[in-house]
Image (cartoon, rainbow, N blue to C red):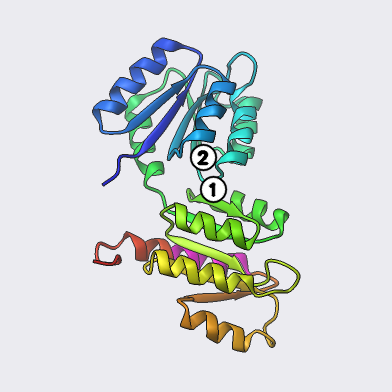
């Protein structure tokens, strides 16, 4: 199994080195950055499962840095450490989609299980040309400890489907000017990983019958109609994450 990759961002070199040594011994791949610019360069060049961020750093605080990181890699899970876990900065961090905020000095008995949990949390690919919908669903799923990757068109959706290990794909049927581009994305996703759960979103309940049959023939698992019932969608996503977690769910 491929090692999980963790980025540690803190201007305190000793803290970075100590945490890196511990995570390396546990089998993680780790990188270190001591400022925001270096961290963004690493995120731009590498795929990470988890980033551990200090809030108080010169030049760019951890919450601002995280906002920049998710533009490059929306699916990265994030943990913030701060001396003021109940302060305004911690709330900014939570509002930006950081899953957990821990108080300094960090309790390794709390940090290490959290890194393990987040690095193994399901990844959902959302493909929709509505940026507001993507942002809303991203926050909802992050609050439930999912990692979420976003794509806004057919080409980006297909590229990302080929580039990462997703448990669930949520795809809008009409990605551009009423075309049924979502079907092509779903087909490519199913080709790459037949075990992935695919969910189609459409606002055309009556008109979509023939298209849905074609999508089902290409691996579609489920459909959600607009206006969207978010709880119903979350239930379908949960079914997908359970399915992929089962030992016999993959292909041989």
213 relative to 181 in the view: left or right: left
Q: Is residue 215 above or below residue 12?
A: below
At which x and y percent is residue 22?
A: 29, 23
Up-down relation of residue 14 to residue 158 (above or below): above
Q: Position of residue 99 (x, y in %)?
A: 51, 40
The residue at the point 76 percent across, 70 percent down is 177
Secondary structure mostly seen in the magenta stretch:
helix
Magenta stretch, residue numbers: 229-239
Q: Is residue 82 left or right of residue 193?
A: right
Residue at (53% x, 56% y) in the render: 159
- Closer to the chain start, of discs 2 and 1, is 2
Can residue 239 be seen by looking at this rendering? no
Asked whether disc 2 touches disc 1, contact meaning CB atoms under 8 Å apart, the reply is yes
Q: Label 1, on which residue?
A: 142
Relative side of 2 to 203, left or right: left
Q: Residue at x 37, y 28 (%)?
A: 30
Label ID, residue 31 = none
From the viewer's side, name the closer residue of 103 and 165: 165
Where does the image place residue 79, in percent across and percent down from the top left?
48, 33
Which residue is disc 2 drawn over?
A: 99
Q: Secondary structure at mark 2?
A: loop
For the point 47% across and 83% down, the residue is 217
* Label 2 environment density (alpha carbons within 10 Å; few <14, some 14–19, many ≥20): many
Q: Say which of 205 and 216 sits in front.
A: 216
How far separated are the C-alphas under marks 2 and 1? 7 Å
Residue 40, visible in the rendered structure = yes
Q: Secondary structure at mark 1?
A: helix
């Amino acid at each position: 199994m491929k090692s999980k990759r963790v980025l540690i961002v803190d201007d305190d070199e000793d803290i970075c080195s100590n945490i890196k040594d511990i995570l390396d011994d546990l089998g993680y791949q780790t990188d270190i950055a001591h400022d925001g610019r270096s961290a963004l360069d690493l995120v731009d060049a590498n795929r990470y499962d988890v980033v551990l961020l200090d809030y108080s750093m010169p030049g760019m605080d951890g919450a601002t840095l995280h906002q920049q990181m998710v533009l490059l890699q929306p699916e990265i899970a994030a943990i913030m450490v701060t001396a003021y876990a109940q302060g305004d900065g911690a709330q900014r961090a939570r509002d930006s989609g950081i899953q957990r905020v821990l108080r300094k000095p960090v309790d390794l008995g709390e940090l290490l299980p959290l890194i393990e949990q987040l690095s193994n949390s399901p990844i959902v690919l959302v493909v929709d040309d509505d940026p507001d919908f993507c942002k809303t669903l991203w926050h909802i799923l992050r609050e439930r400890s999912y990692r979420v990757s976003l794509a806004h068109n057919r080409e980006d959706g297909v590229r990302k489907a080929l580039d990462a290990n997703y448990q669930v794909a949520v795809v809008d049927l009409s990605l551009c000017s009423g075309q049924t581009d979502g079907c092509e994305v779903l087909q490519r996703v199913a080709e790459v990983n037949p075990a992935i759960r695919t969910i189609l979103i459409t606002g055309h309940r009556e008109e979509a019958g023939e298209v849905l049959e074609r999508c089902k023939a290409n691996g579609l698992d489920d459909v959600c109609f607009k206006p969207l019932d978010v709880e119903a969608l979350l239930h379908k996503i949960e079914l997908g994450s359970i399915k992929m977690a089962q030992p016999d769910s993959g292909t041989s």
